[in-house]
Image: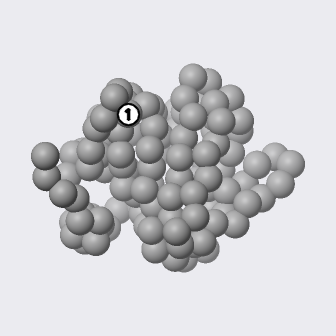
Amino acid sequence: MEKVNLAEKFARFTAHWQPKIVGELNGQQVKLAKFAGPFEWHRHEREDELFLVVRERFRMEFRDRDIELEVGEFLIVPRGVEHRPVADAEVEVLLFEPAGTLNTGNVRSDRTIEQLERL
């Protein structure tokens, strides 16, 4: 058991759209990511995802609407729902999702990361 300092962990990387694992519990992973610009439209067939804004803000786009998220707010995207995170400026986000969740879901692209780094 060790505490995790989010600011220290975020300071250890600069790459956007490359989540890092910072904890695991009950088959779930806690991940940190930095977003900038738009990501891929995708969905996760079997996994729900939680996005918690730690610094700045971003927009989660859905085919029928957008949701703006500010510091201290989170959103759970249910499995099967197509979505696309978009950050107009760099944002720091904590993700909580089942272990093994592929960052691009049902889409394979140059942003797909098969094996996430642990911090």
Name the residue at 76% across, 49% down: 62
Residue 109 horizontal side relative to residue 80, left or right: left
Who is closer to the viewer here, 91 or 2?
2
In the current view of this chain or complex, which residue is farthest to the top? Answer: 46
Q: Is residue 87 in view from this perspective?
A: no
Specify the amino acid type for callout 1.
Gln
* Relative image position of residue 94 (x, y in whole percent): 42, 56
Q: Circle 1 — which element?
A: strand
Who is closer to the viewer here, 36 or 23?
23
According to the picture, the residue beneath numbered tag 1 turns out to be 28
Name the residue at 46% across, 74% down: 55
Q: Determine whether 11 is above or below 50 in the image.
A: below
Q: Determine whether 100 is above or below 18 in the image.
A: above
In the current view of this chain or complex, which residue is farthest to the right? Answer: 64
**Mark 1 closeness class: few <14, some 14–19, many ≥20 residues within 10 Å:** some
* Relative image position of residue 86 (x, y in whole percent): 62, 62
Name the residue at 36% across, 55% down: 32
Residue 3 horizontal side relative to residue 108, left or right: left
Q: Determine whether 70 is above or below 18 in the image.
A: below
Q: Determine whether 82 is above or below 34 in the image.
A: above
Name the residue at 20% across, 52% down: 119
* Relative image position of residue 57 (x, y in whole percent): 57, 72
* Relative image position of residue 97 (x, y in whole percent): 45, 38
